[in-house]
Amino acid sequence: MSLNEYRGVWVFAEQNDGRLRRVSLELLGKGRELADRLRVDLVAILLGEDAGKLCTELIDYGADKVLWADDPELRCYRTDTYTKIIASQIMEHKPEILLVGATYVGRDLAPRIARRLGTGLSADCTSLDIDEETRLLQQTCPAFGGNLMVTILTPKERPQMATVQPGVMQPLQKSTRKGEIISIPADIEHKDMRVSRLRVIEETRRGIGLEQAERIVSGGMGIGSVENFKMLGKLAELLGAEVGATRNAVEAGWASSDRMIGQTGKTVRPTLYIACGISGAIQHIVGMKDSELTIAISKDPKAPIFQIADYGIVADLHQLIPLLIQELLRYKGAR
Amino acid sequence: MNIIVCLKQVPGTNDVRLDPETGSLIREGVPSIINPEDRNALEKALLLREEHGGNVVVISMGPPQAEVALRDALAIGADEAILLCDKAFAGADTLATSFTLGSAIKKLGHFDLVLCGTKTLDGNTGQVGPQLAELLDLPQITYARRVEIQGEILKAERVFEEGYELMETRLPALVTVTREINEPRIPSIDQIMQSYREKEVKTWGAAYLGLYEHSVGLDGSATKMSKIYKPEFGKGKVEFIEGSMEDMAQGLLAKLKERNLI
Ligand SMILES: Cc1cc2nc3c(=O)[nH]c(=O)nc-3n(C[C@H](O)[C@H](O)[C@H](O)COP(=O)(O)OP(=O)(O)OC[C@H]3O[C@@H](n4cnc5c(N)ncnc54)[C@H](O)[C@@H]3O)c2cc1C
Ligand SMILES: Nc1ncnc2c1ncn2[C@@H]1O[C@H](COP(=O)(O)O)[C@@H](O)[C@H]1O
C-alpha cells in the first residue's frame, strides 16, 4: 500500500430519522482541525433520502465537501448497504482518515468497513491528535475501564479509522460556509438487504439526552432508594438539570439505563455536575471528568469524588437534599 | 441447529497497574473470568439448542490458561470446545483476532448461527463480532437483547439510542448479545470435574489452520500501541463547604448564585 496516495479527512455523517446526530457535528469540529493541520479537505459522507438540507448543515459545520448517496433504501441504517457504499467510496477516493461516532450505528458499521478494507480501527476515542510530519493519527482511548489511557497508531494501513465517543469533541460555531455537494451512487442490490428492521419499539424517554445536558444532578448508591431518587429528580427540576446515575444505582433499579454515566454509560460534559452519594470510582469519573463545575456531596470525606470536585460537602443526603429543595423554593419564591 | 459461540477469557478486574520501571502491565495475581457477555451468548446458545436441537461449539483464542474458560463452557453443556492457541497469535488487535477466529470457523464448516458478546471487559472494542461477520460474509445484528428463531428466520431486538428496534434476518447469521438477554447458568463443581474427566478441549495452532505468522497476532495487526499511561483527573483543589446542615445548604446555593447558575 502506498500511503502517499491517501489524502483527506473524512467524517461519517450519521442521520437518524432525517436528523443529524450531534456527534457527527462534533467530529466535523475535530476533523476541521486535523484537515487544516494536514492541509487537506474535510469531507463528510452522508447516506439518506431527501437529505439536501443536511448536506448544507454539514458544510455550515465545517465540511469542504459532502458526498451524498440519496436513496429511499438509505433512510434507515442497514449494515450491508452502508458498508458497501462507504467502503467503495473509500477505495475510490482514498482518504487517510475516517472518523465515525461511537453510536449504536457507528459501532456496528465501522468495524465492518475496517475489516473489508483490512485497516486498523480504534474504539471509543476520547482524544485525537495528528503528527504533521508522519501524518499519523494519534488515537487515544480509555482501556481497562478507564484505569489506563492508550494511544493507538495505524502505521501501515489506510485509512486510519477511529470511532469517537459522543460528547467529547466540540462542534464549530454554525456559520454559512462554502462547500461542494457531490452525489454518489447508492447501487443497492437485493443481496444487501439481508437484515430488515420490522419496527421500532421506541422507549418513552423523558428529558433530553444526557450528552447534551448543560446541567446534571447525578445520584449514586448513597441516595438509598427509589423514593429518594425521585426527590433528587425534584432537585434537578428546580435547577433545570437532567438526572444522571452511577451504574450501581441503575442496577439497583433506581434509574433507567439511559441515565447511566461512565465507562458503560454516557460521557457528559455539562457546565454543572452535582454528584450526590457517588463515591467516584474511576469507571464513573471517566464519564464526567470534563464537567466545568463539579460539586460533590457524600458522607465519606475520603470518597475519591472529592479529588475531582470544585466544591465538596460532607453530609447525609437524606437531610441535605430536602433542605436544598426547601431553600431553592424559598429563593425562587422570593424573586 | 449448529451454533458457534466466541468466548474470551478476560481479567476479572480492571484494577491493572503499570510497572513504574518498564511501563508494562502487571497482570499477575489477577483472577481470570469468562467475559460476562460471552456467558450470556453461551447461555443463549444452550437455550436455542434445548428448543431446536443441534450442537454448540465454543471457540476461544487465547493463552493455554484459557482452557479453564472452555472447561467451564463444557461443564454447563457446550458440546465441543476449541482453543486457538499459538505463540504467533499473541498481541493481536481486532483485525488479527477476527481473522484467526474466522479461519477456525471456516474450518469447522457448517453452522447456522455465530454468537458473540457485544464487548469484552478488557479489549472493550465491540469490533470482533462485526469483523467476523464481515469475514464470514454473514448478516449481523449487534446489541441484541432478545433473540428468537423460527425455522430459517431469526428475529432480534436491538438496542439503540432511542429505544429498541425489532430486526429480522435469515440464517446463517451472526449476533452479538448484551447482558440483558438472559441470566447465565453457573457450572457446579461436579459438572466441572466431569468436564475434565469426560470432555476434550481441542487446541489448534497457526500451522493447523494453515495461517502464516504475518497475518496473525502482533504482525497481523494494523494498529499499534504507541503509549500507555495513567490518566490524570485530579483537580485536587476542592473547597469544602462546612457548618451546620443549613449552613451547607445555603453555602451551596451561594456558590450557584455566584456563578449565575440560579
Ligand atoms: C467494567 C466496569 C464498568 C463499569 N462502568 C461503570 C459506569 O459506566 N458508570 C458507573 O457509575 N460505574 C461503573 N462501574 C462501577 C464502578 O466501579 C462503581 O462500582 C460505581 O460507580 C459505584 O457507584 P456509586 O458511587 O453509586 O456507589 P458506591 O461506590 O457505593 O458509593 C456510594 C457513596 O455514597 C456515600 N453515601 C452513602 N450513604 C450516604 C448518605 N446517606 N448521604 C451521603 N452520602 C452517602 C458513600 O459514602 C459513598 O461515597 C463499572 C465497573 C466495572 C468493573
Ligand atoms: N480472543 C477471543 N476469542 C474468542 N472470542 C473473542 C475473542 N476476542 C473477542 N471475542 C468475541 O468478540 C466479542 C467482542 O470482543 P471485543 O471486540 O474485544 O470487544 C467478545 O464478546 C467475544 O464474543
Image: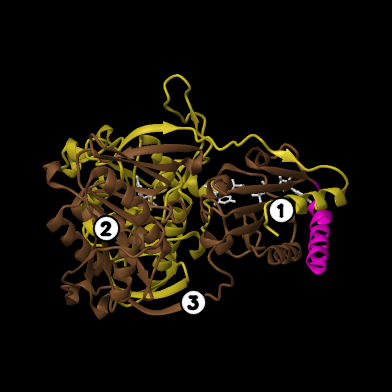
Chain colours: A brown, B yellow
Chain containing mark 1: B
How many marks the image carries: the answer is: 3
Task: Say what amino acid the circle numbered 3 marks.
Answer: Glu
Out of A134 and A180, give the one closest to the viewer: A180
Out of B183 and B135, give the one closest to the viewer: B135
Q: Locate residue A237, reporting x and y percent.
A: 69, 67
Q: Residues within 10 Å of mark 1 (few under 14, many from 20)?
A: some
Task: Say what amino acid the circle numbered 1 marks.
Answer: Leu
Chain containing mark 2: A
Q: Report whether residue A301 is seen.
A: yes
Q: CA distance from mark 2 to mark 1?
A: 47 Å
Q: Secondary structure at mark 2?
A: helix
Q: Which residue is mark 2?
A: A112
Q: Marks 2 and 1: which is nearer the front?
A: 1
- Magenta portion: prevailing SS class: helix
In the visual, does A112 lie left or right of B236? left
Q: Locate residue A163, reporting x and y percent.
A: 35, 52
Task: Say what amino acid the circle numbered 2 marks.
Answer: Arg
Q: Marks 3 and 1: which is nearer the front?
A: 1
- Could you say which disc has been placed on residue A74 in the image? none
Q: Which residues are magenta?
A: A315-335
Q: Report whether residue B196 is seen.
A: no
- Could you say which disc has been placed on residue B256 in the image? 1
B124 lies above or below B112? above
Q: Residues within 10 Å of mark 3 (few under 14, many from 20)?
A: few
Q: Which residue is mark 3?
A: A202
Q: Quadrant of residue B155?
A: bottom left
